[in-house]
Structures are given as structure tokens and as C-alpha cells.
């Protein structure tokens, strides 16, 4: 008889990873699977970054670094905020982390006591409340509709705040909906949370992947907010496991102390590679990829709408479409598995992203090329006409 902890028993599997595992098994058996489930760009890490990683190995940069990251990278990230947002962020406020997941764990550990809750939109990234569960805190999921832009609003925060609420977590652009919180709304949310004496944390992992505009950083309107970001999405470094958080000056020593104890240091080779992430050569590559993602989005949204999927809001960022499939099924979990096994199209059921009307929705990830998206639409069209 196993004596596992209650917290582990309560943490469900990340269903997209279960689907991805099965899709890879079908690949190995020789099936032609269209992969639209994982939130991972299909582009390889840009060559300048990869070459910098190779150079770091050859130069012997393979030992521990300071827990908060190497100073040149912290300075480069601070410079990125100046260049992209016009913000003067001291490098000392930038903590480099083992992926954005490492950042989220440390920020939640700093801000949430056992029994407290962080408010977040439903639908949303499923791992967020599970981080809180590990800390004996909880996620406070608030249903958000298309009329709310699938985001928390000042009104929803007011209505749902209670004595156990420690703060608010936003994601802009958001997974799974691709929705963005724009400047005016960020200001209002910041004012609302501040009036409650709560903490505001904003996931900006998909900044750089917005279409037709650049997203506003919460730091433009609130210097006391905590920001999470990553080299995974825009910069195409998923497997390098590198992220960062920008924290208020008063929290730097607390976060750094946690980093020392939990992670020793972020991945060394990844840090030296990431120094090249902000170079003009790399930026040119990344902006070309942003254009490619927009083309994919436009094709996928148009094709899904033609097939009857409900997409009331065109995604403004990230690389996801959160589509209402209630005209096809009342159980998108089973539908997605059937689609994978029978039609070899891998997509993610809405139940992975919350509770609110989750069985009506499917997340399509346009991290694959135009030809593959067209193939997926063709297979869906064939299934719907049977």
C-alpha cells in the first residue's frame, strides 16, 4: 500500500501531455498525425541562440551560476524592457528562473499563505492552481465568458473577492483563448487589486506573439506587479527551460532566497545561449515567425468557422484557438480522443483548462505549418460529412 501525500493525489494529469504521448506513439507506428495539441512552436531554436549555447559548452560554461542568473543576462532582459516597452527596470529586479514554471512556483510561494487563494480566469492554464495546491493554497477559478474577453474584469474581481483571496493572476495573451488584456483594462484591474490590498501577478509568456500590435506590459501601469515571462514561446527555446520574473524591489531578496534553496541556479548553458535572444539577427528571425503564426491563425480561424465551430473572438495573441464544438458533441474529451485515434488529428479538450462549460470547447494549437493545418481542416471536414 502506497503512502503518497494528499497533495499529489489531488493533482490531475495534464491531459494535453497524455494526448501528446499517444500522438507520439502513433507517429512511431507510422501514422500521419497532425499535431495541434502542444503549446510548443514547431520552429527550432533560432540559430544564433543555438550557436551561442554550443559556444558556451566549448568555453566551459557548465557550472552553477548565481541563483538569480548571470548578471549579463539580467541586464539584457532589463534592456529588453527598455527597448520594447520604454521601461527603466533595474537589472536587480530581474530574476532568471528554471522556466516560467520555476518563476511561478517562487512567486506563489512568496505571496500565498496556506489556505489563501489566487483568483484566475476559467478557462486558463491548468497547471496554475496545481502550483498553489503544492503550497497548501488554492486557485480561485472565476468563470469568464467571451463577453468578458475570457479574462477577469474589474467587475468580476470585485464580485468574487473574499477574505481568503490573496491576489489575482492574469495571463495576457492567454492560454487557451489567445485573448489580451489591453492597457486601460490593466490599469483598472491594477487599481481594483490595489484597493483590496492584494497582489497582482501577470503571465506575459506570449508577449511578442500578438498580431497587429504589441501587448502592454503590466509594468507600464503598475510597478508593484509581479511579471512572469519565458524564453520558450516567442524566443523558441522550450527545451532549454529558461524563464524570468520581474519583481518589486522589496521582494528581490525573498525570491532569490527561494531560488537558492529550490533550484541552486537556472540552467547555465541556456543562460549563455539566451544572451543572443535579443540580438538584431535573432529579432529579425523571431518577427518573421510572428508573421507566419498570424497567417496560420487566420487560416485556422476561417476554416473552423466554416465548419461550424463557435469562435466569437478572433485570438489576438499566443498560438491557440479556443473553439466551441457543442454542435458536434457534449463531451469534447471523448471527441478529441476519437479524433486522434480515428482521424489522426491531435487537439486538446476544453476540460484541460478549467470547469466552466469546458466540455463544449476544444483548443487548437497553430504551432504547425500551413500544409498541416489544411490537412487537419480536411480531415475534420470529412468527419463532419460522414
Image (cartoon, rainbow, N blue to C red):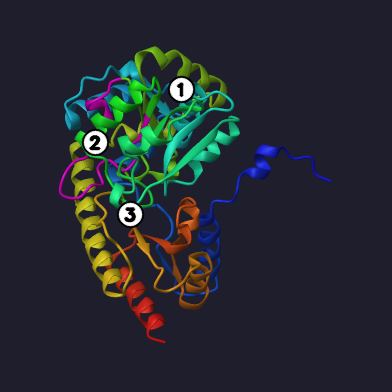
Q: How far, Cα to Cα, is label 1 from label 3?
A: 28 Å
Residue drawn at 64 percent across, 44 percent down: 10
State the residue lying farthest toward the front.
159
Q: Quadrant of the C terminus?
A: bottom left
Return the residue nearer the eye: 70 or 298.
298
Secondary structure at badge 1 equals loop
The mark closer to the camera, 1 or 3, is 3
Q: Residue 185 — which label?
A: 2
Q: Residues within 10 Å of mark 1 (few under 14, many from 20)?
A: some
Q: Earlier in the sequence, mark 1 or mark 2?
A: 1
Left or right of residue 287: residue 159: right
From the top left corner, tell me how far across and down residue 62 is, in percent: 48, 29
From the top left corner, tell me how far across and down residue 37 is, in percent: 43, 60
Q: How far, Cα to Cα, is label 1 from label 2?
A: 39 Å
Q: Which residue position is annotated with label 1? A: 65
Residues at discs 1 and 3 in contact (Cβ within 8 Å): no
Start-end of magenta stretch: 201-223
In the rendered view, tell whether residue 39 sits above or below residue 370: above
Secondary structure at badge 3 equals loop
Counting every numbered tag in the picture gives 3
The answer to if 257 sits in the magenta stretch is: no
Q: How far, Cα to Cα, is label 2 from label 3?
A: 33 Å
Return the residue nearer the eye: 202 or 299.
202
Q: Which residue position is annotated with label 3? A: 43
Amino acid at each position: 500500500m502506497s503512502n503518497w501525500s494528499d497533495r499529489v493525489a489531488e493533482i490531475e494529469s495534464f491531459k494535453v501531455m497524455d494526448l501528446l504521448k499517444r500522438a507520439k506513439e502513433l507517429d512511431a507506428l507510422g501514422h500521419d498525425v497532425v499535431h495541434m495539441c502542444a503549446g510548443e512552436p514547431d520552429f527550432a531554436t533560432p540559430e544564433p541562440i543555438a550557436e551561442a549555447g554550443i559556444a558556451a559548452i566549448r568555453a566551459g560554461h557548465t557550472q552553477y551560476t548565481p541563483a538569480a542568473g548571470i548578471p549579463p543576462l539580467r541586464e539584457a532582459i532589463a534592456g529588453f524592457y527598455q527597448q520594447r516597452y520604454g521601461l527603466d527596470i533595474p537589472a536587480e529586479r530581474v530574476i532568471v528562473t528554471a522556466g516560467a514554471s520555476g518563476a511561478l512556483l517562487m512567486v506563489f510561494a512568496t505571496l500565498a499563505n496556506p489556505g489563501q487563494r489566487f483568483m484566475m480566469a476559467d478557462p486558463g492554464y491548468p497547471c496554475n492552481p496545481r502550483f498553489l495546491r503544492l503550497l497548501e493554497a488554492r486557485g480561485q477559478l472565476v468563470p469568464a465568458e467571451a463577453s468578458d474577453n475570457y479574462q477577469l474584469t474589474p467587475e468580476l474581481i470585485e464580485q468574487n473577492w473574499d477574505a481568503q483571496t490573496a491576489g489575482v493572476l492574469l495571463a495576457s495573451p492567454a492560454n487557451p483563448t489567445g485573448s489580451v488584456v489591453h492597457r486601460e483594462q490593466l490599469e483598472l484591474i491594477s487599481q481594483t487589486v490595489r484597493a483590496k490590498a492584494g497582489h497582482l501577478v501577470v503571465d506575459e509568456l506570449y508577449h511578442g506573439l500578438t498580431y497587429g500590435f504589441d501587448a502592454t506590459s503590466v509594468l507600464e501601469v503598475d510597478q508593484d506587479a509581479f511579471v512572469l515571462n519565458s524564453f520558450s514561446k516567442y524566443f523558441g527555446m522550450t527545451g532549454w527551460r529558461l524563464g524570468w520574473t520581474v519583481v518589486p524591489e522589496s521582494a528581490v531578496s525573498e525570491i532569490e532566497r527561494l531560488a537558492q534553496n529550490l533550484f541552486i541556479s537556472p540552467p547555465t548553458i541556456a543562460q549563455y545561449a539566451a544572451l543572443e535572444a535579443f540580438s538584431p539577427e535573432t529579432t529579425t528571425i523571431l518577427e518573421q515567425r510572428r508573421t507566419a503564426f498570424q497567417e496560420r491563425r487566420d487560416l485556422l480561424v476561417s476554416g473552423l468557422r466554416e465548419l461550424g465551430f463557435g469562435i466569437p473572438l478572433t485570438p489576438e495573441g499566443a498560438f491557440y484557438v479556443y473553439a466551441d464544438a457543442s454542435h458536434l458533441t457534449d463531451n469534447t474529451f471523448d471527441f478529441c480522443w476519437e479524433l486522434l485515434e480515428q482521424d489522426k488529428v491531435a487537439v486538446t479538450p476544453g476540460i484541460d483548462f478549467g470547469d466552466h462549460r469546458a466540455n463544449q470547447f476544444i483548443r487548437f494549437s497553430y504551432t504547425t505549418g500551413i500544409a498541416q493545418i489544411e490537412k487537419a481542416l480536411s480531415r475534420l471536414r470529412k468527419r463532419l460529412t460522414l
